[in-house]
Amino acid sequence: MPGNLVPGEFLVDIDYERCRRCKRCVLNCGFGAFDFKDRTVADSSKCVACHRCVAFCPEDAITVTRNPLAFRENASWDVNLRKMIWKQAETSGIMLTGMGNDLPWLNVFDHLLIDACQVTNPSIDPLREPMELRTYLGKKPAKLKVGKDDGHYRLETPVAKNLKLDVPIMFSPMSYGAVSLNTHRALAIAAERLGTVMNTGEGGLHKELYPYGDHIIVQCASGRFGVHSEYLNAGVAVEIKIGQGAKPGIGGHLPGEKIGRDVSSTRMIPVGTDALSPAPHHDIYSIEDLRQLIYALKEASGYKPLSVKIATVHNVAAICSGIARAGADIIYLDGFRGGSGATPTVIRDHVGIPLEIALAVVDERLRQEGIRNEVSIIAAGGIRCAADVAKAIALGADAVAIGTAALIALGCRVCQKCYTGNCSWGICTQRPELTARLDPDWGAERLVNLVNSWAHELQEVLGALGVNAIESLRGNRERLRALGLDSTTMEILDVQPAGR
Amino acid sequence: MRVISDMTERVKEREAGVKAITLDAKGVYYRDLNENIRELIDRGYQEIVLDGVNGQRYIGDGLDEKVTIVINGVPGNDLGAFMNGPTIIVNDNAQDVVGNTMNSGKIVVKGHAGDVIGYGMRGGRIFVTGDIGYRVGIHMKSFKDQVPVIVAGGRAGDFFGEYMAGGIMVLLGSGEGDSPLVGHYVGTGMHGGVIYIKGKVRDSQLGREVRLFPLEEEDRVLLEGLLEEFSQSTGTSARPVDPAEFIKLMPFSHRPYGNMYVY
């Protein structure tokens, strides 16, 4: 019997008329799809379409195409379903994947349109007039009391520590261990230059990056990897990670292969052991317990702003009310399109709800309860462009976080093979010969360029809307219209249909 | 938040060179109490005695200094969370999550302690003379020369050593009543470290990831040392270790879920 019934997904074709046998493709492929036997030969079954070979072939001799192998069409039995069954029949394993949900679920962002000014109120030209994007995250006082002495006005209301962002876009948590140190370096350098923050994810912070602490949120997840008092004081805010959009409700397993010397010393676990994150924090079984950990971390960090990250699930509004009441300063909502270095396919593709809907209901619930000022909301998990940023903010986000978009800026082709540790672009790998490929300064520059271009686009959108600060768009759903959404979804989003 | 002046401040004469102070913590809000402790440490006090403690949380939370805190009364949850150096002595019972994610230092509880003791603990010692609750030592891990140790004189609830990734746990099982020595799912998900239990445990009580191993001479030497330290710290009597009385549990894999996934 054949050992493997699953045909390869891609075909690699080498044009031998062009190929000069320089072997760059052999050296560049992290997945070992090329070999050299008299001439360069490709094993298409190993190809993941990461395009590293194509990008580095000096003769343009390589083409990667989708395997055209025909399957009998069947609307119920998508080819991917058949392939999963073959793999599972062979191994009895849980299907593992990387990045975010890739099924064609309705994307609400793509059914929302932004307003603009015409005739009756003037739009603003952001190139020549001030356009404020600065954002503060954290508790805001319910009301302000201003006193006066010696003719000078003075704010009497105590204001809690807030996190200052020059742009309402931050980098989402991606742990060192999942991604390479050079990726963390690029994110930290870019965050500093942009006046925003990166987030350690749950794998601790490499000692070398401590100087960037003013632009880093340090995370404390259920595995408590690399969490100690110095770490908790190294960042500008602390985040409790409860859930992740790509894998709500489940823990994480960073395979032992990725725990080399440097990852080991940052996570503070021995080399080569699996880093297992329990599904829940075992000191949090209730909102009261969450409050307990929030204040344990505040006590240990000198009362820095504290964020709680959750995946968007069905009951997200009530959960967020609880998180706000538990004392969090920031709620980080990770939608069901959020990425991951490794997640079971069944969870990634079928668990959770869209970010857009979660944002709307959380913002609404917190307003109804009169506690919206107690927390800021970060929206993540499916932010792909400046339009998504504007729409998320109009739906109620204070800021957004980008993960996948940032990785794409660094060269990621979204091949979804992050869990293999073979990333040819040096991003999601710990193999030294691969990680060395990502130059942190080159990466940082690309990240800065990306965020700056989105910031300019945001300013254009704000100008078109006739407002001069991102604050004026925040939660302003009147400036959104829906096209092609059902009436219940529009009611939940509190957005009118286009034309009304 | 100047509470110190309201608290009875008595600087005691101790051996030369040790600055010690006693505070009356009765009715003091936890934030004020902990603020005071940090301030006293900044002022150079090496021993702080807290009288009348009744449920205040987070005592010793995140402290890096090698001071001694003596607690008379029952401290609240998260005692010594994220702690990195101090010694805390509780002359009473303690509540839940003692030594949460503790990095180094020592906590001695001369009574019982609650659930989730030593969660994610990476170094230091926790000694409890009495019983401990559920999920004690969960996800404890060792790193280089940091080997966390939990010793309890009494009995333990379910999920003892769940997800344990490193370190040493010893359960001595003394006490009255007929509650079992330890609950179910002992060492479930365990992928590092070692558990010693004085007494017998049924196979049905064990997690799938652990096996029984015979005690070697080096285990006896290790236990002798730990139990000597335990008895000195807790003021209980130490007896010579008879390996025949103990069982030793270790995981059979550092990667229990390595074959669970397909790509």
Image (cartoon, coloured by chain):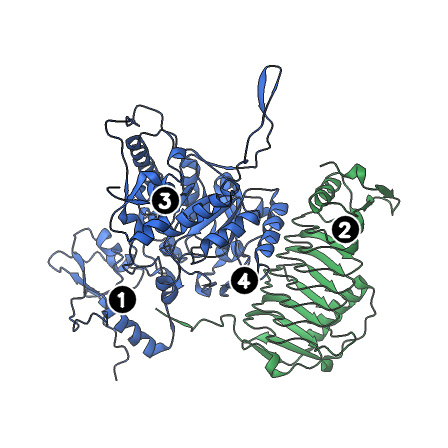
Q: Are marks 2 and 3 on the same chain?
A: no
Q: Which residue is mark 3?
A: A392
Q: Nearer the viewer, mark 2 or mark 3?
A: 3
Do tag 3 and tag 4 residues touch (Cβ < 8 Å)? no
Chain drawn in blue: A
* Residue B214 percent coordinates (x, y): 65, 81
- Upstream in sequence: badge 3 or badge 4: 4
What chain letter is assigned to the residue under label 3? A
Badges 2 and 1, same chain: no
Q: Position of residue A287 (x, y in %)?
A: 57, 55
Query: Which residue in the structure is indicated by mark 2?
Result: B69
Residue A43 appears in the figure:
no
* Residue A76 placement: quadrant: bottom left
Q: In which image quadrant can residue B101 be found?
A: bottom right
Label 1 sits on residue: A46
Compare residues A5 and B180 and report the one nearer the observer.
B180
